[in-house]
Image (cartoon, rainbow, N blue to C red):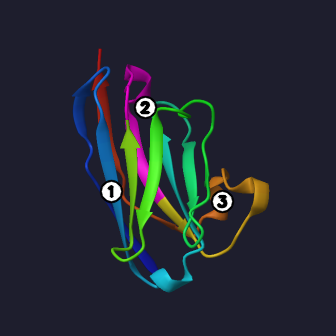
Amino acid sequence: QVQLVESGGGLVQAGDSLTLSCAASGRTDSIYRMAWFRQAPGKEREFVVVISWSRGGTYYPDSVKGRFTISRDNAKNTVYLQMTSLKPDDTAVYYCAAAFRPSGSLNWLQGTYDYWGQGTQVTVSS
């Protein structure tokens, strides 16, 4: 199993930056990819970004491309999400997820991830 713990959420103003962290423990040597998802009130959980654990390749949807950056520190088993130019629409609970297998073009699907963190709240005021 893998345990994921997110941190770094908070209340910020529009235009501000914020960095989230996701610390993994347990069978981290089996992780193939990690991702961030988010869920706004009343909405479905949304894919934010994915990173290959070994190669570092990333994929961003247009909604966050150019504003969000994912990175990893394999030595610390930690993934980071740097968020800039935050907008009120970015308000959500942000979740970290890990998968043991590749999924090709389906990296954005929640069901392809094996483990999830408890989430961290990000609130962006206008």
Crowding at mark 1 (Cα within 10 Å: few <14, some 14-19, many 20+): many
Amino acid marked by disc 1: Ser
Q: Given the image, on which type of amino acid does mark 3 rest? A: Gly
Looking at the rendered structure, the secondary structure element under dot 3 is helix
Label 2 vs label 1: CA separation? 22 Å
Location of residue 88 (image quadrant): top left
| x 31%, y 20%: residue | 14
The residue pinned by badge 1 equals: 21
Residue underneath mark 2:
41
Contact between marks 2 and 1 (CB within 8 A): the answer is no
Instruction: Measure how far apart labels 2 and 3 are at the Cα level.
Output: 21 Å
Callout 3 crowding tier (Cα within 10 Å): few <14, some 14–19, many ≥20:
few
Residue span colored magenta: 84-96
What is the crowding at mark 2: few (fewer than 14 residues within 10 Å), some, or many (at least 20)? few
Check the picture and name the quadrant holding the C terminus: top left
Label annotation for residue 111: 3
Which tag, 3 or 1, sits closer to the chain's start? 1
Image position of 5 (left or right of 109): left
Tell me the residue at 47%/51% (across/down): 70
| Residue 108 x/y as whole percent | 66, 50
Percent x, y of residue 67 = 46, 32
Hey, which quadrant is residue 48 in on the image? top right
Frontmost of labels 2 and 1 is 1
Q: Position of residue 99 (x, y in %)?
A: 59, 69
SS class of the residue under badge 1?
strand
